[in-house]
Amino acid sequence: MQQKLETIIGLEIHVQLKTKSKMFCSCDNNAEGKQPNSLVCPVCMAHPGTLPVINRQAVEWTVMTGLALNCDIPENSKFDRKNYFYPDLPKGYQISQYDQPLCMGGYFDILVNKQNKRINLERIHLEEDAGKLTHSKNIGASLVDYNRASTPLMEIVTKPDFRSPLEAKIFLQELRNLVRYINVSDADMEKGHLRCDANISMRPIGTTELSAKTELKNMNSFKAVEKALTYEVNRQTKLWQENCQPKYSATRLWNDDQEQTIEMRTKEASHDYRYFPEPDLPPLKLDQEWVKDLKQKLPELPQAKKNRFIKQFGLSEKEVNLLISNRLISEYFEDVLTETRAWVDDLKQKEDDSEKTYKELVKVVSNWLTSKLFALLNSEKISISNCKITPENFAELCAMLYTNKISSSAGQQVLKIMFDKGSDPSQVVEEQNLGQVSDEKELDTILDKLIAENPKPVADFKAGNKNALQFFIGLAMKETKGKANPKVVIDILTKKLS
């Protein structure tokens, strides 16, 4: 009888901080698109006689991240030397943190299959990044670019609390959103701002002892993380079933093209790195009042904002997930709603209907923002911060749609012009003659004419063929060049044909 196994996964996540300068020198920290080895200096290249200086902003942002993840912030911290040789590590060692990191413990709650799952953290520490190797087949050599060397790198280490690849993927997606919310990293996996190593092992259900783990590297997307972990679950399960379970810890690379992991080396233990306190940097003493001030500076975090949006605006979880997927979008949405309040007052609804009207307008704003405006932003590959449509103008457009001053199809035309030119919606409607015809007398005359000219569909409707109604609606829209209010047309037609 085969043993029932459970999956044990822990993550080590590296987040590149978007400080202006590097971790221990004043070199520009933005290497994207720059010539190789153009952003280096004697300090980050470890020339003899140079001394590192701690980047205060990197320390502050790491502590802020720890506070957002419910970590304890010890009063004392220090940097250590992690000794290992690699061609793109200029010093021959890495300045990292070992036994006194900036953040200890912590947790992060995620939602998996509508169930809350708490992932506990081991620590968050701050270190410097290495350079980048490019292996060239053309010249038969490896090229090294040190631009990224000494970039501030925050490492978030979780407890082995994940029980499925899906949980790991969701955690990473939610973590990316969080660090973007507090504005410490762009966290783009494809650009290497967010990198993840995963430790995975299996064990018989009911046991507590951890087995030899496999560390997975080279996963550059959320999809790759899930696929690599799923592959490893299947591989290790097969080994257990054959009584050949892993006996030692190893590092394996994920090959995205072949969709399999490949063993790279046996895994090092911490003593292999010969850690010792960094002699060129003083220990850090973190003032707890300063820590409290940082906590006060934290913005509303994604999970808190999600709960508030659902409760305050009556939106579904799916709608809210789209709105909070980006901090700037969530802020734009709320700015639009602030302007929408003014339009509710202008609609002069009865006092007992005003809140109902507002909730209905919120739905219109949410729908048009997450579908129509998102589509335009994605097609042009621009962010909401570069969008020409002001929150005030977007609110006005939504109010015009809600009050049937324009049709949905006309609204899309107006939105595109607003998107391209930043125009006022009422001005666009007037210039393009896109206003919706809702006047009953005007539509009554048009429909009388259409009914008189088409006696057969009238007879069909009276004989029970409801499709005839759609025929007349189509004629009315054609006659009015798409400007007739469909609801008013249906009401008048139903009365006349009945």
Image (cartoon, grey):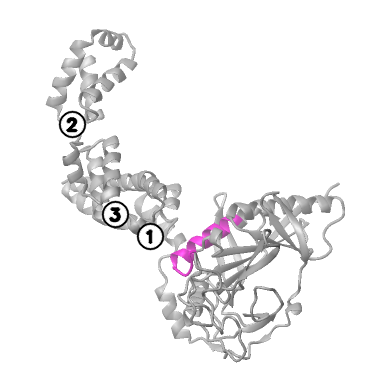
Could you tell me how far apart the alpha carbons at marks 1 and 3 are, in whole angstroms? 14 Å
Which residue is tagged 1?
Answer: 328
Local packing at callout 1 (Cα closer than 10 Å; few below 14, some 14-19, many 20+) is some
Q: Amino acid at mark 2?
A: Val
Span of residues in magenta: 169-186
> Does residue 291 lie above or below 161 as drawn?
below
Residue 401 visible in rendering: yes
Q: Amino acid at mark 3?
A: Lys
Which residue is tagged 2?
Answer: 437
Q: Quadrant of residue 104?
A: bottom right
What mark, if any, has residue 255 been given in the picture?
none
Which residue is tagged 3?
Answer: 388
Q: Nearer the viewer, mark 1 or mark 3?
A: 3
Element carrying mark 1: helix
Q: Is residue 218 left or right of residue 365?
A: right
Q: Amino acid at mark 1?
A: Leu
- The location of residue 290, given as percent across then percent down, is 44, 84
Residue 209 visible in rendering: no
Sequence-wise, the earlier of marks 2 and 3 is 3
